[in-house]
Amino acid sequence: GRNYFERASAPDVENMEEAKERAKILAEAAALKQLASDYMHPEVGVKTTDPTLFGRNYFNRYSAPETEEDEFADERAEILAEAAAFKKSAVAYLHPEVGVCLEDANLFGRNYFERASAPDVESMEEAEEKAKILAEAAALKKSAAAYMHPEVGV
């Protein structure tokens, strides 16, 4: 048989280092060719499949509203709330025929503890003293009943 690898007309065989170097050079040449093509033909556009490249930054775009600091935002919210309250008050003053609309359920409740006719709440000391006085009164009543009716017996 013939040896196709060592004949005079056989192509030279590269070692591993030369093959890696050749592959690296060819990859760089292909990248340079792609860059040159992109530069010369901007109408082609960029083609990519990376999903992060398709996101929009809604905060730093030119048409985005200017953002303000939290301190100013809180102050603005308070001012707008006060203005709304003043407007509501002015409308109520200028149009008495509208009437008052109550929506809070707490307005219809009754406070049974702080009304004028509510019994006074005793402190612990007052309650103990009252119990002692009632016990003494019961003992005096029993003694008076025993004195008034000697026939009952002891």
Image (spheres, rainbow, N blue to C red):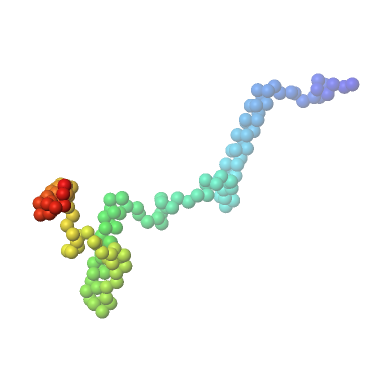
Looking at the image, the residue that sits furthest to the right is 1
Q: Is residue 113 left or right of residue 31?
A: left
Residue 122 point in image, percent of width and height = 17, 52
Quadrant of the rendered image containing residue 116: bottom left
Residue 17 point in image, percent of width and height = 65, 23
Residue 137: in sight, yes or no?
Answer: no
Which corner quadrant holds the N terminus?
top right
The residue at the point 65 percent across, 28 percent down is 22
Q: Is residue 23 left or right of residue 121?
A: right
Q: 54 and 154: which one is in front?
A: 154
The residue at the point 16 percent across, 47 percent down is 154
Q: 44 and 147: which one is in front?
A: 147
Q: Is residue 83 left or right of residue 142?
A: right
Residue 25: in sight, yes or no?
Answer: yes
How many numbered circles does the render carry? 0
Residue 137 point in image, percent of width and height = 12, 51
Quadrant of the rendered image containing residue 90: bottom left
